[in-house]
Image (cartoon, rainbow, N blue to C red):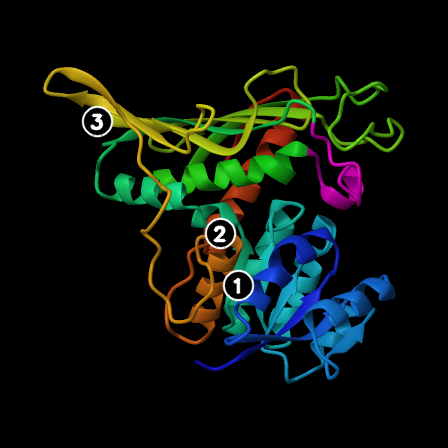
Amino acid sequence: MKKVKIGIIGCGGIANGKHMPAYKALADQAEMVAFCDIIEERALKAKKDYGDKNSKTYTDYRELLKDKEIDMVCVCTPNISHSEITVAALDAGKHVMCEKPMAINYEEAKKMIDAKNRSGKLLTIGYQNRYRAEVRYLKEEAENGTFGDIYFARAKAVRRRAVPTWGVFLDEEKQGGGPLIDIGTHSLDITLYVMNNYKPKYAVGTTYHKLNNDTKTGNIWGDWDPEKFTVEDSAFGFVVMENGATVSVDASWALNYANPGEAQTLICGTKAGADMEVDGTKLRINGVKNGRQYIAVPDFSAGAVDFFEGNADLSKPHVYEAQVFLNAINGKGKLVVEPEQAIVVTRILDAIYLSAKTGKPVYFD
């Protein structure tokens, strides 16, 4: 395999917590040769931690994209700039891994699809939860027909008190929203992925600003600043698909709810169902056999990782995600997260926000 040369655009939390460690784990296949951040110190630190003496640093992503040595870029910036940077990178002849959500809204996401189509380069979105062992197992069971016709699902991303108080998470202008676009997007993605249903008919939604002004919050990352908390603290949606299936979407950073959980899905089909809602259980499948109800709990403690060459720990979803994209760039495999799927997630999120503002259902074309 050709060693892929990577440029990192945005050297903040998600780059340091996910993408750069993943590509470092795959150092025999990938090399981070350039780092860009509007705060120069971040780019310099990323070079020190993940690059070498020949790595380049930038404060303007446009300058990074001029480097013909770079094969792909990883876009790890606030949501508002995902589309702008991705489009520019694709037009510059780079493959792109863009962190979730795909874009700040559906219109911006469409620009990314258009750029991908005209450039002929690969574009994927950082929905790493698809690579978790239990999600891969659930997807395979669905494809094998275990659940029959899946007609109800719940995408759950609910925290009791875990509001991110750093960066721009609380800034509606830069992020486009709060928990719905931040963590609800993961749960909705894995739900549609398992259902293999990307044809929504209409959506209804509500958003709440009920706890934004609280001061003694009990938040795990410390009290938030009410003046800066301009996004919703909770959002809920109800989506009807073209085939009649319904999907409930629950997303909150702060909710008086004693059974929180995120990046979870629940599905109910004509033959069986599955959920991830029991403490300490990654997945359980329920159904009826021989006239008796049953619950099956798969063991994910070992095994069942697809074989790739190399010694990286592919049990880690972010490493698996990076490996899949490197393989696709080298023509040795297909994308797991197609942008045409990710844009449907963004479109549904848009519809829930719009419905919450107007008080009316939003119908899709």
**Among all residues in the image, which is located at the extreme left?**
290
Identify residue type, mark 2.
Pro
Q: State which tag comes first along the sequence, 1 or 3.
A: 1
For disc 1, the marked residue is 123
Q: Nearer the viewer, residue 352 or 55?
A: 55
Which residue, given by chain and number where applicable, does mark 2 sit on?
A: 317
Q: Residues within 10 Å of mark 2 (few under 14, many from 20)?
A: some
| Residue type (three-letter) at the residue carrying disc 3 | Lys
Indicate the quadrant where residue 358 lies: top right
Q: Is residue 355 found inside the magenta-colored segment of the image?
A: no
Q: Is residue 169 magenta?
A: yes
Q: Residues within 10 Å of mark 1 (few under 14, many from 20)?
A: many
- Among numbered discs 3 and 2, the one appearing first in the sequence: 3
Any part of residue 94 in sight: yes
Asked which secondary structure carries label 3, the reply is loop
Would you name the residue on which mark 3 appears? 271
On screen, residue 303 above or below 166: below
Range of residues picked out in magenta: 162-178
Closer to the eye: label 3 or 2: 2
Q: Are marks 3 and 2 in contact (CB under 8 Å)?
A: no
Quick one: label 2 or label 1, which is nearer the N terminus? Answer: 1
